[in-house]
């Protein structure tokens, strides 16, 4: 499977996401760094380079996720998949507290927050500022 993503496919994925990271919701125009097109299921796990398997992602989320598709949660540990922007609604798994903390009541949300480190202090400060500016 090709890793090449055409310009037209990049544009489709970016527009579909409204130019926001599909994991942390950071607007691309608020980032100092170029956003990535993420393979939701990586090529090494059989994912394809097609619109249905691609997400618009900030570099921090994409690099944190890497080729992973799940993590272990609980005792005893159970594999829990990550949030999938093509099949899951963000609002079903996450909500932002006025403090900027990202909260969840689902295991999918917990797995995603854990691996993407979405409650790192820098993310919390960034979300609090986005809330203040009406961007989130």
Image (cartoon, helix red, strand yellow):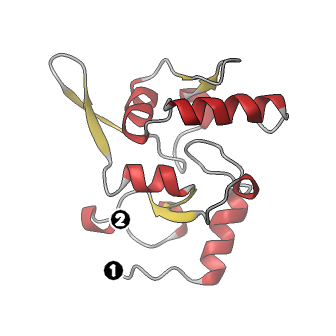
User: Local crowd at mark 1 within 10 Å, few (<14), some, or many (≥20)?
Assistant: few
Along the line of sight, the residue nearer the viewer: 89 or 33 = 33
Q: Mark 2: which secondary structure?
A: loop
Quadrant placement of the C terminus: top right
User: From the image, which quarter does the N terminus lie in?
Assistant: bottom left
**Which sits in the foreground, 17 or 60?**
60
* Residue carrying label 1: 1
- Mark 1 and mark 2 in contact (Cβ < 8 Å)? yes
The image shows residue 54 at horizontal and vertical percentages of 51, 63
**At x 52% / y 62%, what residue is drawn?**
52
On the rendered structure, is 35 left or right of 80? right
Question: In the rendering, at what x and y percent does residue 71 appear?
Answer: 27, 37
Residue at 58%, 41% in the rendered image: 24
Q: Which residue is mark 2?
A: 47
Measured along the vertical axis of the image, is residue 107 above or below residue 118?
Answer: above
The number of discs equals 2
Q: Quadrant of residue 55?
A: bottom right
Image vertical order of residue 86 relative to residue 72, above or below: below
Label 2 to label 1: alpha-carbon separation:
8 Å
Q: State which tag comes first along the sequence, 2 or 1.
A: 1
Q: Residue at x 60, y 29 (%)?
A: 124
């Amino acid at each position: 499977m090709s890793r090449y993503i055409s310009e037209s496919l990049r544009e489709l994925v970016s527009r579909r996401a409204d130019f926001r990271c599909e994991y942390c919701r950071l607007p691309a125009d608020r980032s100092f760094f170029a956003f990535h097109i993420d393979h939701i299921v990586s090529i090494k796990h059989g994912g394809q380079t097609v619109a249905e398997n691609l997400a618009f992602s900030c570099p921090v989320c994409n690099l944190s996720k890497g080729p992973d598709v799940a993590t272990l949660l609980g005792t005893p540990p159970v594999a829990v998949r990550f949030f999938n922007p093509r099949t899951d609604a963000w609002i079903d798994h996450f909500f932002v507290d006025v403090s900027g903390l990202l909260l969840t009541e689902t295991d999918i949300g917990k797995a995603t927050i854990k691996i993407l480190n979405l409650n790192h202090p820098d993310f919390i400060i960034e979300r609090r500022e986005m809330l203040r500016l009406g961007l989130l």
